Amino acid sequence: MEKYIKNMNISIFNLLKLLLSFIFVISFSSCHSKYVSLKNEVCRNGAVWNNDKTQIAFVTIQSASRAPEGISTIPDGGQREIEYCNLVLYTYNTKISKLTKLTEFKDVCYTASRDNYYIDLVFNKSSIYYNINLIGWKTRVEKQVREKYKDKYFSIDTKTKKITQIEKPDFTVQYKKYNKSNQISFKDIHNILKEIPCNKWGLNLQKIYPQSKEDYKDYLINGHINKLTYNCIINQIASSFTKNDINDIIKEMQIHKNDLYKEYQSFDANDPYRKSIKLDEYNEYLNKIEETKKRFNYVQ
C-alpha cells in the first residue's frame, strides 16, 4: 500500500510537471502576433530642402515589427518584436518626382521609434552634410559603431554617393547658415512622400518577413495591419493570387466588413472604442482588393 501511494505521488508530480511545461510552451509560443507591420517614418530633424527648394534630403526609420500578445503584454502592454530595422538617407526631387537612396545606417538602428534618432542635415551644393545623434549611444550601440558615428560629421556626394568625413566647423557654418530657412515640416514632407509605393522604398515584405500565401490572405481579410503593410501586400504579393483566391478574399472581407459595421453601430457615437474600429479604413482596403481584381482581369 505504501509503495502504491508513493508511486501515485510520483505520477501526480510528473503530471503536474507536464502540465506546467505545456502551459509554459503555449504561453511563450504565442508571445507576439503573426501579423507584421511595416513602418517608414522621417526621423526627427531629418528633412531639409536644398536652397532652390527643388530637392529634399531626409532620413527615414524603416521597420517591421509584431505586436505583443498573451503573456508578453504583462505588465505594461509589452514590447513589439522587431523583425527589421534600418535608417536610410534619401533625396527626393520634387520637379521630376524622383526618389533616390544615397546610403543607409543599419548598424545604428536599435529601435523602431523615430524619437530616438536625431539626424542633422544640410545641403552644400551637390553634397549633403550630416551628423547622426541618438538616445542610447552608451547602452544600446556597440562600441565600434559608436566610434564610427558619434560626434562625427560627414559629407555625401548626391551624384557619386561617395562619403567623406568633414570637420565640425565646416558642418556648423553650413548648418547655421541654411538649416533654419530650409527646414520642412513633418506634415509637408508626409504629404509629398505619402503616395510613393513601397517598392520604391526598397521594402520587400516577403524578404523582410516571409510567410505563406494563406497568411497574406489572412492579413487582407482581418485587417490587422497598417496602410503601408496593406499596400505592400497589394503591390508585391496580390499578383500571385489566383482568381479563386481573390474572390474568396473579397467574399470574406465583405462578411468581416458587415461584422465591423454591426460592432460600430453597437457603440455610442462618442465612445472612443467606436472610433478605433476604423470602418472607413477597412472599406478602403476592400475597394483596393476589388480594384486589384479588375486590374489583373479576374472576371467571375
Image (cartoon, rainbow, N blue to C red):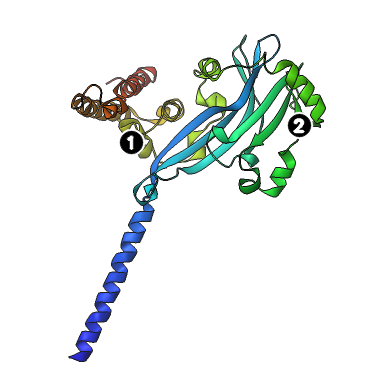
Q: Which residue is mark 1?
A: 218
Q: Dot 2 surroundings within 10 Å: few (below 14), some, or many (20 or more)? A: many
Given residues 126 and 96, the one toward you in this image is 126
The reply, left or right, for residue 234 in relation to residue 165 is left
Asked where in the image residue 8 lies, by quadrant, the reply is bottom left
Residue at disc 2, secondary structure: strand
With respect to residue 53, does 200 lie above or below?
below
Q: Which residue is mark 2?
A: 153
With respect to residue 167, does 51 lie above or below?
above
Specify the quadrant that holds the N terminus.
bottom left
Q: Amino acid at mark 2?
A: Tyr
Residue 48 image position (x, y, % from top left): 65, 19
Q: Amino acid at mark 1?
A: Asp
Residue 127 visible (yes or no): no
Sequence-earlier tag: 2 or 1: 2
Q: Residue at x 48, y 40 (%)?
A: 209
The reply, left or right, for residue 238 in relation to residue 56 is left
